[in-house]
Image: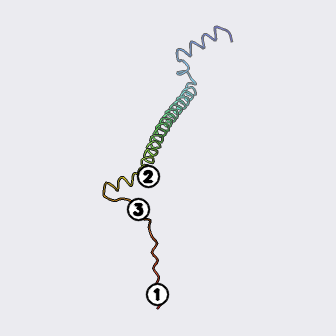
Amino acid sequence: MSSTEMKKGLYNIIKGKFLVSDDALKNWRFILFLSILALIMIASSHSADQKVHRIAQLNNNVKELKSEYLDVRKQLMQAKMESRITAAMAKRGLVPSITPPQIIKITNPKK
């Protein structure tokens, strides 16, 4: 192929003559096929991006919930401390017993 034929072919492509020539139906099918593939690729890319953003959002939610869990657990541990319970009950007028508890045994008399 000479350079003039290559130039002529390039000019025909630029002018779009391949779209209106006798075998244009084959070219249109190929262009339609490529367009559909491009749309599928774009949709797939958007879907993947949305999933990545959703995963990042869920990871942030997990971090927040872990932090809240640790804070509530710390508050619970402090609330369960004997000194805190004793102080709370002292406000209500209850104090710990000085005498230790005694075991009471109940025996049934034989009939």
Percent across and percent down for residue 29 are 55, 30
12 horizontally vs 81: left or right: right
Q: Secondary structure at mark 2?
A: loop
Percent across and percent down for residue 65 are 45, 43
Quarter in which the N terminus is drawn: top right
The first of marks 2 and 3 along the sequence is: 2
The first of marks 1 and 3 along the sequence is: 3
Q: Amino acid at mark 1?
A: Pro
Q: CA distance from mark 1 to mark 3?
A: 33 Å
Q: From what the image shows, is residue 4 above or below residue 33?
A: above
Q: Secondary structure at mark 1?
A: loop
Badge 1, how many Cα within 10 Å: few under 14, some, many 20+?
few
Percent across and percent down for residue 2 are 68, 9
- Check contact, mark 1 vs mark 3: CB within 8 A: no
83 horizontally vs 93: left or right: right
Mark 2 highlights which residue? 81
The first of marks 1 and 2 along the sequence is: 2
Task: Specify the label residue 98 is tagged with.
Answer: 3
Q: CA distance from mark 1 to mark 2?
A: 43 Å
Residue sticking out furthest to the bottom: 111
Mark 1 highlights which residue? 109
Please identify the quarter of the rendering in which residue 37 is found: top right
- Observer-nearest residue: 101 or 52? 101
Color style of the picture: rainbow
Q: CA distance from mark 2 to mark 3?
A: 19 Å
Q: Residue at x 65, y 8 (%)?
A: 3
In front: label 1 or label 3: 3
